[in-house]
Image (cartoon, coloured by chain):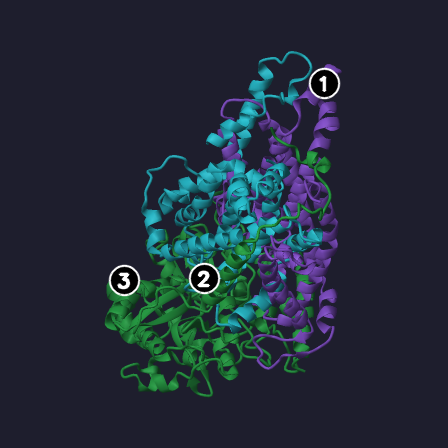
Amino acid sequence: MTTRSPRSEGWVRRAPLLPALVFTIVVTQIPFLLTIYYSFQSWNLVRPGSQHFVGFDNYVAVFTDSQFRGVALNTIIMTLGSVVIAVILGLLLALLLNRHFVGRGVVRTLLVTPFLITPVAAALLWKTTLLDPTYGLINFVLGGQTIDWISQYPLASVMAALVWQWTPFMMLLLLAGLQSMPGDQVEAARVDGAGAWSIFVELTLPHLRRFLELGIVLGAIYLVNTFDAVYMITQGGPGTASANLPFYIYQRAFLGFDIGQSAAMGVVVVILTIIVATFALRLVFRSFGAAGES
Amino acid sequence: MRRSAADGATGPRGRGAPHGPRRGARLPFLAVLAVGLLGLVTGCSGAGALGAEPGVQTVTVAIVSNSQMKDAIKLSPQFEAENPGIRMRFVSLSENEARAKITASVATGGGEFDVVMISNYETPQWAQNGWLTDLQPLVDSTPGYDPADFIPTVRDSLSYHGHMYSVPFYGESSFLMYRKDLFEQAGLVMPAQPTWQQVADLAAKLTDRSKGRAGICLRGKPGWGEMLAPFDTVLNTFGGRWYDPQWHAQLTSPQVQQAAQFYVDLVRNYGEPGAAQAGFSECATQFGQGNAAMWYDATSAAGTVENPDESTVVGKVGYAPAPVVATPSSGWLYSWSLAIPKTSPHPDAAWKFMSWMTSKQYMQRVGTQLGWTSLPPGSRLSTYRIPQYQQAAAAFGPTVLNAIQSANPQQPTVQPVPYQGVQFLRIPEFQDLGTRVSQQMSAAIAGQKTVQQALDQSQEYAATVGESYQ
Amino acid sequence: MAATVEETSTTTSAPARTEGPRRPSRVGPVLLTTLTWIVAIGFFFPVLWMVLTAFKSEAAAYTDPPTLFFSPTLEQFRAVFDAGIGPYLANSLAATAISTIFVLVLATPAAFAVSLRPVEKTQDVLFFFISTKMLPVVAAIVPIYVVVNEIGALDNIWTLIVLYTAMNLPIAVWMMRSFFLEVPKELLEAASIDGASLGRTLREVVLPIISPGIFATALICVIFAWNEFFFAVNLTAANAGTVPVFLVGFITSEGLYWARLSAAATLAALPVVLAGWFAQNKLVQGLSFGAVK
């Protein structure tokens, strides 16, 4: 064995990490730096020669845009609402599946399918087959109504598709959590005369806690970036009733071609996300940093 | 069996604790592999698409996926057969998406496309920006192309300083379609030049919710190319305008308020279900399936309505000019046309295909192979002199030609305006402004906002844009 | 679905919570099972309907009330292939497969460096990786577009491959790390006492243990890459479009053809659905960042 200096020793340790780290930094961070730069420019793509430095003008515009606030609120409702509903439904389904019964494997297979469907296809399915006012299945099931779901309840329509896709994920995760529960504890509690409800509240839920946290954090990470469903189902409409921040920024950038303003919105969203994410990440670290780290 | 992750909390701790003094001497092999791979990635990312053949020029066309364009794609192998050195690739996108993609590509000099489908909204602006190839020399030097045959209003709208920068594939105005059979049953008559008030009365009488039938189908889907197009013609003919000549926004003027209230009431009371999501294609389905008694939309809809594969109301439809109030005519003027971005590496091959697709011979080709109702309408005067087309389009042909020829983008409304265009304002900010205003109007149609609220918000947007012109 | 069978056997120790303290009656479980089945079918029904619609003629797709019985036709699938889904499928396949390979090649050593032989500041590195997932993609799309355009890589499948690799890499590092942590320390120590080099230890001791984990990671990467839409729609045109882009382009502006759309959607979703079905347990493992073993 050759002896190494602590310095080169450190690099040997780091070497396997570096390619991934450098790659991630280059591909994900450089665009963000550029976003910050653009956010101080006035630049409309369809007005050539319009690019010039404007300081904080774009940020002022973002904060005085009442639509932006509405859209931010939509994003929060859409993300939190979908995650919470999906977690609750997922938990109920997991409880239903945490038993022995005929065809359990088949049931799980059926239930997991919505999560696997390409989101664009799933959104299309909701927009046409399920929610269409004239030919949609949901109105048919409700006895031939002609409710125009997508115009009247745009946010709820998008959320329905999201919940449908994410409930299976929560179900899988929580089912795995339930199955990792030591049976003897439950047995002991039962012998002590504990009822089903108190076993659920006092044993099951605490045990599931980190699975719930994980589901919420992962769900939120993906759902806050929802684009496909909004784009396909409502195009953010009517008005901006169902637009979320990703869709709104996309519109500012690729329909408005206002690069400066969309960049400023992007920066604001990143800052807000960092604030929220710091809390969320603590949760992740507490949940599984523990799982073996450090 | 299943180690609960919670157990991990009590698992081994001690970050950075040394794992023993010995370390593999060959450790970096993974790193080397990974770095090599990175090199591979960056090396390859410069390369183009897979499978380019030598000596063959590939012409990439971005088009909007309307039925006439799909016909062109279907017929394009014949072009390739006649021009062995050219291979065609098509990207067909929905209207909103095509617009976003094409604008982004052309504005940034993306160069993915050799031919782009744009309209009379973009052409003069982009020509001015220097983004498009001047087609006039090509037009003039192509024997038998006959540019004088293009309908004058359309040709003018695609020209900048007298040079054509895009060539029309089809042109359209707007008109009113109505079900002659239903009118007859109800004992109603469509006036030769209807007014909007008359249309509203007719719609009220023809709405029959128990049969799932709407009195009229009108677009409500947000997008400046969607609901804003018909709404703008209503706004204009009610005497409203977007700006006064000094660029002061006018969207809360009494005329605009009246127009907006009228449009929203009409579609809410007598319109199709799901109106706030209905655009051209949704209305085409509704009207084609017999679920609406009238439909005010693009003249190009006639091809769909009279096509037995897509419509159950063939032969039952009458056509009337766009309804008016205070202007003598109100139809819009629109043309899907083909242009060559300056960045195209194969402008000559691109022109060969464009001239093929917009030629008189192409009309014959479509007519004989796909049927005479499938001709792309509204581009060439000679189309309306083809006997087979005259016969096939007897019900609507003359109305369409008339509407296109009488559209007036220079003076769209009663009072003077500082902009050009009927259903759009030819300023770069309009795509964004129009989309935002259409979102407001769509929200009013969905009942999420009052017309007043929608217009107040729209006025704010319009004022911001107007300031940059004052 | 062999995996499912294996899994039920592990749960014998966890009796159904709902049974209550007394001997369970026969009725309760039957009701619950029925309910479970109804809910499952309800969740699955839209998918089933999509597949059924794909085999209908256009006229049969647009009926009110909807019909369950119809004479099936392959006409719609033929139409989808005629419309040229082929190259898009090939692009999706290439983007998914190559980016997944890249992710594994980059993530495996990185995960090793933050697990078995942790570098200093492991926490910070992990934090950094996961934080890139939290940043909204949309905030970076404009610069990405501009940069990709500058280097002439718009509408190039390699652009998507690089972006998908970056998109999946952070999750992959986290997942793989949790699998590496599963490797018993004693085994490593034993190997190192035997004088095995690290490379050999990795290949002969570690790899066999974590290979199911690698598979789980790969599956997740495949799902997300195959389904990705945002980058694909903004950065591709004629050459590099993927299946979701095809699907959107297929929604024509001349009336919506539901049957044909359903056929296209079915084709788009099929590969990932099948993969997910046959590897359900891997799916759970991967998505829980290995917290579920």
Q: Position of residue A201 (x, y in %)?
A: 74, 28
Q: Which chain is purple?
A: A
Nearer-the-camera pick, A235 or B28: B28
Distance of label 3 from label 2 (alpha carbons): 39 Å
Mark 3 in CB contact with mark 1 (< 8 angstroms): no
Residue bearing mark 1: A188
Distance of label 1 from label 2 (alpha carbons): 58 Å
Nearer-the-camera pick, B282 or A203: A203
What amino acid is labelled 3 in the image? Gly
Going 72% across and 15% down the picture, which residue do you hit? A191
Residue bearing mark 3: B371
Q: Position of residue C239 (x, y in %)?
A: 41, 64
The answer to whether one can see residue B181 in this image is yes
Query: Mark 2 falls on what kind of element?
Result: helix
Q: Residues within 10 Å of mark 1 (few under 14, many from 20)?
A: few
What amino acid is labelled 1 in the image? Ala
Picture layout, residue C41 above or below residue A34: above
Q: Residues within 10 Å of mark 2 (few under 14, many from 20)?
A: many
What colour is chain C?
A: cyan
